[in-house]
Image (tube, helix red, strand yellow):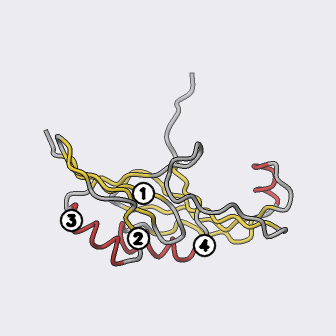
Amino acid sequence: MTAIRWHHASLTVAEIDPAIAFFSAVFGFEPLFIERGMRDDIIALTGRDGLACDFTQMRSEAYPLILELIAFTSDDGARPDADPLPWRPGAGHVAFHVDDFDGVVAAALAHGAEALGKAITFPGGRSIYLRAPGGAFFEIEYLVEA
């Protein structure tokens, strides 16, 4: 059996540049590369003619995960409306464990994120869901170390 390893998590955004700026400023991610106007490969991957995308894969020294941001466009101009919450099947979010919950939440809001609701406190930590510029959902959590 061959080894299976986690490579990246991908978030769909409306526009690539504001999303790159946000995840760089708040979480320290830097692009490994940015590709604009990918057409043939994204049509092959999705099976949808007329689709194109801009995307990046980003890395931060603080996280072992590669974060991919992808903004799709269509020749016919069609684009689904953004979800107001990550509740539709297929939608998702990434979560960042932080040491300074209030400081990181404040930084995210100052850089254009919006909270979906309120922060919650639970045995062992705190958590909040937010939407980044570009529409991607993410979570900030603080977990008490045992």
Please tell me in which quadrant of the rendered image residue 12 appears: bottom right
Q: CA distance from mark 2 to mark 4?
A: 14 Å
Tell me the residue that label 4 is attached to.
15
Circle 1/circle 4 CB separation < 8 Å? no
Q: CA distance from mark 1 to mark 4?
A: 16 Å
The tag earlier along the polypeptide, 2 or 4, is 4
The tag earlier along the polypeptide, 4 or 3, is 4
Q: Which mark is residue 102?
A: 3
The tag earlier along the polypeptide, 3 or 2, is 3
Indicate which label's residue lies in the foreground, 2 or 4. Answer: 2
What SS does tag 2 mark? Answer: loop
Tell me the residue that label 1 is attached to.
138
Please tell me in which quadrant of the rendered image residue 128 appears: bottom left
Circle 1/circle 3 CB separation < 8 Å? no
Q: CA distance from mark 4 to mark 3?
A: 27 Å
What SS does tag 1 mark? Answer: strand
The tag earlier along the polypeptide, 1 or 3, is 3
Mark 1: which amino acid?
Phe
The tag earlier along the polypeptide, 2 or 1, is 2
Q: Position of residue 51 (x, y in %)?
A: 79, 61
When the figure is inspected, residue 3 is found, relative to residue 133, above or below; the finding is: above
Q: Position of residue 8 (x, y in %)?
A: 52, 50
Q: Is residue 43 left or right of residue 113?
A: right
Q: CA distance from mark 2 to mark 1?
A: 10 Å
For the C terminus, the quadrant is top left
